[in-house]
């Protein structure tokens, strides 16, 4: 095999090993984090996590996907040949298939107008505080766009975990990344409880606040 071809195949192997290392680093940070960062967006195997895990953190299937990628990278580095390259492409295609299917499903379900909101309304990884406000429209007072967005998230997208002892504060989980969100009404003195606020809450704080309602395990 020409030296240039072997060098290129070894380079592909190096990239595969780098991706495997990044995957392990992301999973460790994801596991050890408090759930307020969107580590899931850095997951090279997002589709595998989305289809097989419902806990908000990488599961067994996601971790196991690191092994074939790393072994393929090592094979490409040690034995650069058309055969090992084709084997790697087959493995990579199989690992990428769940992500392709997942994104296709997300696009199909969210880019339509049937529910009145689109995927663009889902929280960004750096977004952690949605504050609703009441505005005057003529002789009426109504919620602004943030109020409507909060209502859509808690009713259509987030998983409700429970409420605190007052019944006003409610804990939710974003199934996409496992982050915990708390729905509160800071201006509860106003008629109807005032406008809503949806804020990311750390797992430790959520577990402490909602422990008496048996939600400690769910918050972790």
Image (cartoon, rainbow, N blue to C red):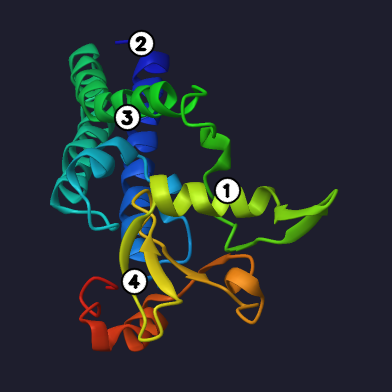
Secondary structure of the residue carrying numbered label 2: loop
Please indicate whether residue 180 sits to the left or right of residue 122 in the image: left
Q: Earlier in the sequence, mark 4 or mark 2?
A: 2
C-alpha span from label 4 to label 3: 25 Å
Q: Earlier in the sequence, mark 3 or mark 2?
A: 2
Residue 43: x and y in percent read: 37, 45
C-alpha span from label 3 to label 2: 39 Å
Judging by the rendered image, the residue that carries numbered circle 4 is: 32
Please indicate whether residue 201 sits to the left or right of residue 50 in the image: right
Residue 185: x and y in percent read: 57, 73
Q: Are marks 4 and 2 in contact (CB under 8 Å)?
A: no
Graded by Cα atoms within 10 Å as few (under 14), some (14 to 19) or many (20 or more), the crowding at tag 1 reads: some
Secondary structure of the residue carrying numbered label 4: helix
Closer to the eye: label 1 or 2: 1
C-alpha span from label 1 to label 3: 23 Å
Question: Could you say which disc has been placed on residue 65 in the image?
Answer: none
Question: Could you say which disc has been placed on residue 149 in the image?
Answer: 1
Write the residue at 34% across / 88% down.
208
Q: Quadrant of residue 156?
A: top left
Residue 155 appears anywhere in the view? yes
Write the residue at 38% across / 70% down.
171
Judging by the rendered image, the residue that carries numbered circle 2 is: 2
Q: Earlier in the sequence, mark 1 or mark 2?
A: 2
Q: Quadrant of residue 117?
A: top right
C-alpha span from label 4 to label 2: 46 Å
Establish if 3 lies above or below 28: above
Q: Earlier in the sequence, mark 4 or mark 3?
A: 4
Graded by Cα atoms within 10 Å as few (under 14), some (14 to 19) or many (20 or more), the crowding at tag 4 reads: few
Q: Are marks 1 and 2 in contact (CB under 8 Å)?
A: no
Q: Residue furthest front?
A: 139
Question: Could you say which disc has been placed on residue 102 in the image?
Answer: 3
């Amino acid at each position: 095999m020409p030296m240039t071809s072997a060098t290129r195949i070894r380079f592909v192997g190096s990239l595969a090993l780098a991706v495997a290392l990044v995957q392990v680093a992301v999973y460790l940070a994801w596991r050890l984090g408090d759930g307020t960062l969107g580590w899931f967006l850095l997951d090279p195997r997002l589709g595998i996590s989305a289809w097989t895990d419902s806990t908000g953190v990488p599961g067994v299937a996601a971790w196991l996907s690191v092994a074939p990628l790393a072994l393929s990278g090592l094979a490409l580095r040690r034995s650069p040949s058309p055969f090992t390259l084709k084997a790697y492409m087959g493995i990579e295609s199989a690992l990428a298939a769940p992500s392709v299917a997942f994104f296709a499903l997300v696009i199909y379900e969210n880019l339509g107008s049937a529910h009145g909101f689109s995927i663009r309304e889902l929280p960004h990884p750096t977004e952690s505080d949605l504050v609703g406000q009441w505005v005057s429209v003529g002789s009426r007072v109504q919620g602004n766009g943030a109020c409507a967005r909060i209502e859509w998230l808690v009713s259509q997208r987030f998983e409700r975990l429970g409420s605190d002892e007052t019944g006003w504060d409610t804990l939710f989980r974003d199934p996409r990344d496992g982050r915990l969100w708390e729905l509160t009404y800071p201006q509860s003195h106003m008629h109807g409880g005032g406008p809503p606020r949806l804020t990311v809450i750390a797992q430790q704080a959520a577990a402490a606040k909602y422990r008496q309602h048996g939600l400690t395990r769910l918050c972790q």
